[in-house]
Amino acid sequence: MSMASKEPAAEAAAGKEAVSSSDPDVSQDLHDALLSDTEEPRSGKTSGKTSGKTSAHAPPSPKPAGYDDLLSTGALMKKVLTPGTPDTRPNKGDIATIKVTVTVDDKVVEKDAVDAFRLGEADVCPAWDICVQMMNVGETAHLIGSPRFDKRVEVNANSRVEYNITLEKVETPPLLIDLPISERTKLAYEKRKRGNVWFGQNELDSALHSYKRGVMMIDLQDVTDAQMDQQKDSLPAMLDERCLLLNNIARAHMAAKAYTEAIASCDLCLKNKPENVTALYIKAKCLMFRQEPEESLKVIEQGLAAATGPEHTSDVKTLQRLKQEVINSQKAIKQKTKELEQRMALGLVDPDQDSADTVEAAAAAAAADSRPATPWFLVGVIGVIVAVFAYFAFLHK
């Protein structure tokens, strides 16, 4: 299976081929942001768009007249513009359909957008999720939120973010056990796309939550053997979607430098699809960052063996670059270890203080530059020797 993902269309079952540069599942991303061969995975939860601009600890805004302070902090305030039908507030897990207009500093950035999402499942920005749970069907409310609640738009710490939200309808979703496998696969796909949005904003916890909910939706332990046999034609698409979700879980863990968890997720994917090149790539990358180069090289060879056919041309190049990176990492580790031993022999280093960082520093250096490392320490040693000889020559003149 190629690292290019299989995406279902909105109206079709999961598994149809599609490529989009904005989707973190596609092969191109293996050569770009997250799985770049020259960059160590990112960490943290701050969006790239708003880094350095927003603050989670901005002072609370004064409460305007007629507004309810939903969090009692001044960070999220709501005013009812049009009342809805009494006693029709949605419950957690319900599917809410809203129409929303977003304004930042008096400039409309999104007008009359319609979205449907499950409440309380981190599908949308927290401002919407919190507010809608306090609205009746048909109600229109004006919401003023802290910039930290919505990282989809360019804001700074002093921006004024406002929403006009209308709760158009609320639906109680059917039980998963009552849905056919194809419908459950579509729901899992939607969760993955929601997670991809969070991942693009570097909100890794929310991304993981969405991906894991997607996996849960196609956990078929509650499906009988008879039902499974009747729907066997839907199983391949479901397994494809499950692998995409598991790989995205692994990628989010890797971005957070939780390499053990990332490897475990890859292994779950490989259990059903042992030749999944994306899972093999992520696993090899994590093993390298975990300073296990021999194991990483073994997994890379598995990936190269699986990446056969013209559709895997770019995948082979990516794996070969990773292989060279791991080899350079091995060399750097050996060199750093040798240096440390020499310094310890001369009493120039505290082994308890420096030895723990040596291997990690070497691997990071190799990952940052796949070219062979220049032995600058030898240049320094030669310089010291030349200086000593010059000193003694000067004394014996």
Image: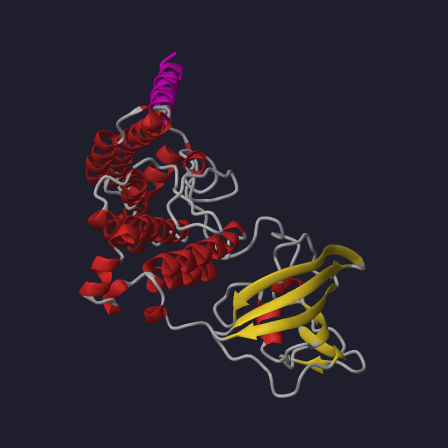
Q: Quadrant of residue 67?
A: bottom right
Q: Is residue 380 magenta?
A: yes
Q: Quadrant of the N terminus?
A: top left
In the displayed orientation, state which residue is furthest to the bottom. 87
Residue 23: percent from left, percent from top: 48, 44
**Residue range highlighted in magenta:** 376-397
Residue 189: percent from left, percent from top: 42, 54
Residue ID at (32%, 70%)? 177
Using the rendered image of the protein, determine whether residue 192 is visible from the camera's viewpoint.
yes
Of residues 396 and 71, the one drawn nearer to the viewer in this rendering: 71
Position of 140 relative to 354 (above/below): below
Of residues 46 and 124, the one drawn nearer to the viewer in this rendering: 124
Q: Is 346 positioned to the left or the right of 43 in the image?
A: left
Position of 376 relative to 169 (above/below): above
Image coloring type: secondary structure
Q: Is residue 6 magenta?
A: no
Of residues 34 and 196, the one drawn nearer to the viewer in this rendering: 196
Using the rendered image of the protein, determine whether residue 348 is visible from the camera's viewpoint.
no
Number of numbered discs overlaid on the protein picture: 0
Of residues 136 and 232, the one drawn nearer to the viewer in this rendering: 232
In the displayed orientation, state which residue is furthest to the top. 397
Residue 3: percent from left, percent from top: 35, 37
- Looking at the magenta stretch, what is its main secondary structure? helix
Q: Quadrant of the C terminus?
A: top left
Residue ID at (63%, 67%)? 98
Position of 204 relative to 309 (above/below): below
Residue ID at (71%, 82%)? 68
Residue 262: percent from left, percent from top: 31, 52
Q: Is 8 positioned to the left or the right of 326 in the image?
A: right
Position of 19 relative to 105 (above/below): above
Q: Quadrant of residue 53?
A: bottom right
